[in-house]
Amino acid sequence: MLGRRYLQNPFPDFVPGEGQTAVSDKQIKSLIKLYVETILEKYDTVADERGDLYVGDAGVSLMFWKLYKSEHTRPMFPDALKQAVAFMSTAKEKCKPYLKRSSERFSFVCGNAGIYAVSAAISMAVEDTKTMANDLAVFKTGMPASLEKMHTKTGCDGFMVGRAGYLSGCYWLNKVLGHKVISDDDVISICQMIIASGREYSKIRKSPSPLAYLHHGTQYLGAAHGMCGIFHMLLDSPWFRTIPISAPKDVLLDIKISIDLFVELQDSVGNFPVSMEDLLTGRDPERRLVHWCHGAPGAVYMLAKAYLIFNEEKYLNAIRLASDLVWNRGVLRKGPGICHGVASGGYVFLLLFRLTNEMMYHYRALKFMELLINPIFQGEARMPDRPYSLFEGVAGTVCFLIDLLDPDQASFPFMDAFH
Ligand SMILES: [Zn+2]
C-alpha cells in the first residue's frame, strides 16, 4: 500500500516448541561494532548546535557510557569511557549559553538537565569528583526552576522538556550514583506541582480526566510530550514505592482514574490516539503512529509501571496488545532509532519479556534486531535527519542492542519500569 509508514514484517511469528532460529550474541555484537564505528566515522558534531540527549553529543556520550557499563561490550570497546568524556565535553561547551535560562535548567531530554545528569555519571566512572560535584550542582538548579511557575497554558510537565523529564533524571541519578542525590521531599514537591498543574488544566478544559496536560497547544497522550510520560514519572515517585502506597488519597485517586481513562482509549489493534484532539476529530485509527514518541510503543512503560504497582491484568493485557501491534506494524520506514524507528518497537518486546518471561517476546525482540540487517528493510528504510544520534539514530539502536545481550536488565533510556 502506497504511503504506508511501515513495511510488512518479513518474519513468521513465534510458535511454541518450534525451535525457531534467531540471531546470536555474536551477530548482535558485530552489529554493535559496525554502528559504533560508523558513529565515530560519520557523526557530525558541527551539525549539532545544542549538545542535548535527544539528537546531540550528550546522547552519543550516553551510548559510550553504556558500552563501558555493560560487561558484554566493555572488552570490545576499551576506549568507550574516553569517548564518553570527549562527547560530553563538547556537549557541555554547546549548552553553556543556555545555563541561565530557567526552563532549560529542568529540561531533560532536550535540555541542560539531561546533559549534566549524564555528565555526573561519567564523572563518577572516571573518578573525577570535582567535575561530578559541579555537574550535580548544575543539575540541581533545575529543582527551583521546575517549581517556579505553573505554565499551565504552554505546558511544562512533559518528559522531553518538562517536569516529568526532570523527575526521570532524578530517579536515574539516584540509581546510577548509588545514593540519594535528590531527596524524596524534593521529588515529591515536583510531583505536587505536576498534580496541581494537571488539575488546573483539567478544570480549564472540563476534561473527564482529573489530570490533563498541554504541550504547545495540544493535549498529547504519549510518552514524549504527553500523559504517559507524566503518569509514568508520578508512578515512579516515592509515593508509590511504599507498601501500602503513601500518596495522599485524593492524589492516588486522580492518578488512577486518569490512567484508567487513558487505557480505555486503546483501539482494537492495540494503539492509542496521539492526542485528545486526534481522538475528537475522529482521525482514521489506521493512520495512528506506532512510535515511542506517539502511540502504544511509548505508552507501554507507564502501563508496565501501573501493572507492577496496581497488579491489575488489564494493564498487562494492554501491553500485550501493543506488542502485537508493534509486531505487525512496527517495521517502520523511519529507520532504526528508538524514538520513531525499529528499536522503539524492539524495546517493547524487551519490556514484555522482563514482565512475563515468555519466550515469544524474546524471540520478537531478536527478530527486530534481525530486521536491522535485513536487506529489504535496509533498502526501504529512510535515513533519519540525525542518523547517529541517541533518539533518532543508531546511538539509541546500540543501546537497544546492548540491552538485547542482557534482557533481564533491559530498559528504554530513562524510562525504567522496574527500578
Ligand atoms: Zn519520535
Image (cartoon, helix red, strand yellow):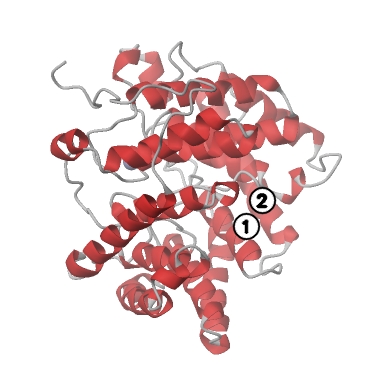
Quadrant containing ligand 1 reads top left
Compared across the picture, whether 199 is left or right of 365 comes to right
Q: Is residue 275 above or below residue 60?
A: above
Note whether residue 215 is visible.
no
User: Closest to the observer: 78 or 281?
Assistant: 78
Compared across the picture, whether 358 is left or right of 225 comes to right
Q: Is residue 361 above or below residue 32?
A: above
Looking at this rendering, what residue extends furthest in the right direction? 244
Q: Position of residue 245 (x, y in %)?
A: 81, 40
Look at 41% across and 29% down and name the residue there: 295
Q: Secondary structure at mark 1?
A: helix
User: Closest to the observer: 147 or 246?
Assistant: 246
Tell me the amino acid under the disc marked 2.
Answer: His
* C-alpha gap between disc 1 and disc 2: 9 Å
Q: Are marks 1 and 2 in contact (CB under 8 Å)?
A: yes
Question: Which quarter of the picture shows residue 417?
Answer: top right
Q: Which residue is mark 1?
A: 171
Compared across the picture, whether 245 is left or right of 45 comes to right
Q: Earlier in the sequence, mark 1 or mark 2?
A: 1
Callout 2 crowding tier (Cα within 10 Å): few <14, some 14–19, many ≥20: few
Question: Which quarter of the picture shows residue 9?
Answer: top left
Q: Tag on residue 123?
A: none
Quarter of the image with the N terminus is top left
Look at 68% across and 21% down and name the residue there: 313
Note whether residue 165 is visible.
yes
Q: Which residue is mark 2?
A: 419
Q: Position of residue 203 (x, y in %)?
A: 57, 27
Look at 46% across and 41% down and name the residue there: 347
Which tag is nearer the camera, tag 1 or tag 2?
A: 2
Compared across the picture, whether 156 is left or right of 202 comes to left
